[in-house]
Image (tube, rainbow, N blue to C red):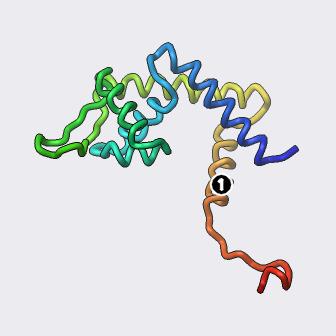
């Protein structure tokens, strides 16, 4: 069994599962994540939101337009700011986000408990692994060939 493959496959499965759960709420997983990001970073620009989502600016703009049209976020940029947005979550957006977060989080917690895992401990372990993967370490040559 390969850890990297299993984690990748789990994330893909969770993304698809989240898409199905969020669909009745009128959200895609990217829109949900956008709400999370905007709620945590009021005043965020559309460009920075797209970067945080890992999508193109065009795709990010489509997500923003959809969330604006649904009244889940607002653009507080002053007139004359050009194309630069200043995004914030609305009260209805915060309500939708809270409900979806509970729905998604509690369901996965229930799955962990069903197989005998402590969701909090598992989350801590995954965070520690993620932090380690993100740590940049100097490469140490393992043979003479790599040193040249």
Q: In which quarter of the view is residue 35 placed? A: top left
Q: Position of residue 12 (x, y in %)?
A: 67, 34
Q: Which residue is mark 1?
A: 128
Q: Is residue 114 left or right of residue 110?
A: right
Mark 1, secondary structure of its residue: helix
Residue at position x 49%, y 25% in the image: 28
Residue at 44% across, 30% down: 31
Q: Where is residue 10 drawn, in percent x and y?
A: 71, 35
Dot 1 alpha-carbon crowd within 10 angstroms: few under 14, some 14 to 19, many 20 or more: few
Outermost right residue: 1
- Asked if residue 66 is positioned above or below residue 39 in the image, the reply reads above
Identify the residue at horizontal 46%, vertical 16% (top origin): 25
Count of marks overlaid on the render = 1
Q: Depth check: 83 or 134 in front?
A: 83
Q: Nearer the viewer, residue 80 or 86?
A: 80
Q: Nearer the viewer, residue 104 or 65?
A: 65
The picture quadrant where one finds residue 145 is bottom right
Q: Quadrant of residue 115?
A: top right
Q: Is residue 144 left or right of residue 48?
A: right
Say above or below: 70 vs 123.
above
In x, y percent, where is residue 76?
20, 38
Q: Which quadrant: the C terminus?
A: bottom right
Identify whether 94 is placed above or below 3.
Answer: above
User: Which residue is painted at 50% across and 28% down in the image?
Assistant: 101
Task: Give x and y (percent) for residue 57.
Answer: 39, 43
Residue positioned most to the left:
79
List the single residue furthest toward the top. 24
The quarter of the image holding the N terminus is top right
Q: Nearer the viewer, residue 2 or 47?
A: 47
Horizontal relation, residue 112 to residue 52: left or right? right
């Amino acid at each position: 069994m390969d850890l990297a493959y299993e984690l990748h496959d789990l994330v893909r499965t969770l993304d698809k599962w989240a898409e199905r759960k969020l669909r009745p709420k009128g959200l895609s997983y990217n829109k949900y994540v956008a709400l999370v990001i905007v709620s945590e970073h009021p005043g965020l620009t559309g460009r920075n939101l797209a970067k945080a989502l890992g999508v193109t600016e065009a795709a990010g703009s489509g997500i923003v337009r959809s969330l604006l049209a649904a009244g889940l976020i607002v653009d507080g940029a002053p007139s004359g700011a050009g194309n630069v947005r200043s995004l914030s979550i609305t009260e209805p957006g915060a309500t939708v986000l809270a409900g979806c977060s509970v729905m998604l989080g509690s369901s996965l917690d229930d799955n962990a408990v069903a197989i005998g895992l402590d969701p909090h401990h598992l989350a801590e372990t995954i965070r520690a692994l993620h932090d380690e993967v993100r740590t940049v370490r100097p490469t140490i040559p393992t043979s003479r060939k790599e040193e040249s």
